[in-house]
Amino acid sequence: MTRMIAFFRSDLFLSLAGGFALGIAGIALVRPASAETKGYESKAVIIESPSMVATN
């Protein structure tokens, strides 16, 4: 039991727990782009050169 308490108070455990907490906070703050449920209209700008127009 004393070894387990010593491990929980060790720098290794505190470092791992701190890294895990920072990782969870980072995931909560930064959402992936696909997490948005709103629909957006996408637009594209196409620039054709004269050689592309002649072949089409």
Image (tube, rainbow, N blue to C red):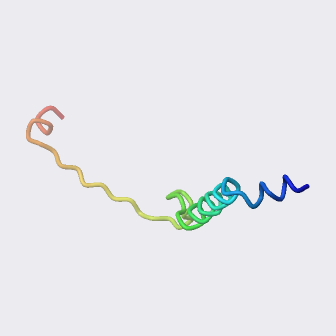
Question: Could you tell me how many numbered marks the image carries?
Answer: 0
Q: Residue at x 70, y 55 (%)?
A: 13
Q: Give me the residue at 60% from left, 66% from top.
A: 25
**Which corner quadrant of the image does residue 40 belong to?**
bottom left
Which residue ends up furthest to the right in the rendered image? 1
Residue 31 falls left or right of residue 47: right
Task: Name the residue furthest left.
Answer: 50
* Along the line of sight, the residue nearer the viewer: 40 or 1: 1
From this view, report whether residue 29 is shown above or below residue 34. Answer: below
Q: Residue at x 14, y 37 (%)?
A: 52
Residue 10: which quarter of the image? bottom right
- Front-most of 22 and 46? 22
Q: Going by the picture, which residue comes out furthest to the top?
A: 55
What residue is shown at x 23% (from left), y 50% (from top)?
46
32 vs 28, nearest the viewer: 28
The quarter of the rendered structure image containing the N terminus is bottom right
Left or right: where 15 falls relative to 46: right
Q: Is residue 26 left or right of residue 55?
A: right
Q: Position of residue 49 (x, y in %)?
A: 11, 42
Q: Quadrant of the C terminus?
A: top left
